[in-house]
Image (cartoon, rainbow, N blue to C red):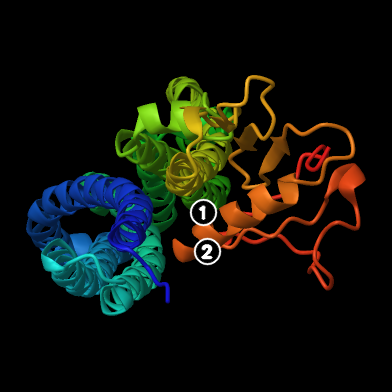
Amino acid sequence: MSGPKKADVVAQLNIAQRSQRLCANLISSAADAAIASILRDAEGIVRDIAAQESTMRDESGSFSSDARRIAPDAVRRAGEAASSSSAAIATSRDILSRAHNEVDRAQQQEQEARGTFDRAEEEYDRAMQAVNSAGGHYMHQEMARAQQATQLFTQAERELAAAAKVRKDAEKSASSALQQAREAKGAVQSARQQIQSTRNEAQSLLKAEADARRIAEEKRRNATLALEKGRSALHRLENLPHQKFCPGKLDALSRELQAAQQALESGRFDTALADGERIASAAVRLEQEVAAAQKEFERRKAEAETQINVLDATLTGMDEALIREWSDTPDACRHAKQVIDQARQAVAVEHFDDATEPARNERQKLTEALRSAAEAKSSHDKRMATGAAIMEVLQELNFDVTHEPGNKTEPMRIAGQTPDEAGKGDFDIAIPLDGEVNFEVNTPQGDISCIGAIGELQKRLEQRGIQWTTTDWGHAEGAAPSGQPRKTTVQEQVQIKQKGKAGK
């Protein structure tokens, strides 16, 4: 009667605990660091603009009745700007709150997964204590506990994957909150500028109205007020970045206003009145055009800066040494730093499109680099565990065993030498990272005695939970047992395939 031994149970436990938990912890720790950094930035901006909201509302509601009468449209627009800014702040708070809730939910799910890990470790400890106190009998019960611990680790890994999905949604919400906060900040600043400009306009119009009352002729009074409205509208534009977004348009309206003023001074009141009203309307449209362009400018700037922040936060949470050694793109972190520098330079010269997409794409590449590194490192751990089992069996079979651990590109190599001076029966095994294992057995031409050696190796590996099935017997084709399946499997889905010279 045969069964699993103490070493088999210990190997089963160690393989599960090392490989599964390492991969999950690497990914979650990097994502948590990025989200925390993004949320801190968003919270800081929301605190700053929230402190300005009360002052902005007071300023918006402090216009006198005369100001509301003389410049009703400007006062209305200022009030709308303040309301819009308050709504933007409220939206920022709401998105930020949702992001926090999603982060809490991800952390709760991860905590539940940790609980599963804890139960697995408890099962591991009970199995290990049973192993340590057991005698030399076969350990069927202990192996069952070890396998239960492995199942719990696998369950915890699935739960961590679910938590990672929620965390990814939380990161999107955090990024959205950061961008919305930046846009709200720009809206508050713009609203306060508009309130001040409206106050100045109302004061100017009130003064012009007082002057107009002293004018005897109705037409002159109306023309004078129309020109002052046009002049006030143009003055309001002076505080806006009109030359940046609509170059030359304000200068053209100013020249038209000068011509209308000359018409007024020469007594052509109807012309001055019509031109003044037309110029005032044109100035309002230009103001709206400049404001819309500035809003779009601030949106694109906020988006670019947000993508840079997200990429920088993601990079901060990366394990650069792990990526350099195991990722498919080992230079990913160095390249990400270059993209951040280039994107910041692009923002500095207001080339936002040259920053937004490169930063967004680079973050995806960086995340993929971490994923491939974690998978490769996990595969390497599994490879080392499988190789350790093979070496132990070879030593039991009185082979002199040496090995090279391998890396991402080089396979793990195991050499098993027999006492035979001619090297008959020597094993040479190579285990690359992808799990396609090659091996050779040194036997003379026509000698199929390797069948027995391989059979013994298969038998002892099977006792350790590893299935070795040879699918290619080289020129000893036909020597394999009848009905031999043409499939190669090893525990943990590591495939074993003969190099092509076995049995020779």
**Residue drawn at x 69%, y 21% as measured from the top left:** 422
Q: Residues within 10 Å of mark 1 (few under 14, many from 20)?
A: some
279 vs 78: above or below: above
Q: CA distance from mark 1 to mark 2?
A: 89 Å
- The disc at residue 160 is none
List x then y, in percent, for residue 358: 57, 35
List x then y, in percent, for residue 109: 26, 73
Is residue 411 in sight in this rendering?
yes
Q: Report which quarter residue 163 is drawn in.
A: bottom left
Q: Nearer the viewer, residue 410 or 97?
A: 410
Q: Residues within 10 Å of mark 2 (few under 14, many from 20)?
A: some
Dot placed on the residue nearer the N-terminal end, 1 or 2? 1
**Residue drawn at x 36%, y 41% as measured from the top left:** 314
Q: At label 2, which amino acid type do we have? A: Glu
List x then y, in percent, for residue 134: 16, 68
301 vs 115: above or below: above
Which mark is in front, 1 or 2?
2
- Give SS at disc 2: helix
- Residue placed under numbered mark 2 in the picture: 462
Seen as rendered, the residue at the extreme front is: 420
Q: Is residue 39 left or right of residue 250?
A: left
Q: At label 1, which amino acid type do we have? A: Ser
Q: Is residue 277 left or right of residue 470?
A: left
| Pointer 1 with pointer 2, Cβ within 8 A | no
- Give SS at disc 1: helix
List x then y, in percent, for residue 325: 46, 27
- Residue placed under numbered mark 1 in the picture: 281
**Residue drawn at x 12%, y 52% as measured from the top left:** 47
**Residue drawn at x 63%, y 19% as measured from the top left:** 421
Q: Nearer the viewer, residue 86 or 258?
A: 86
Which quadrant: the C terminus? top right
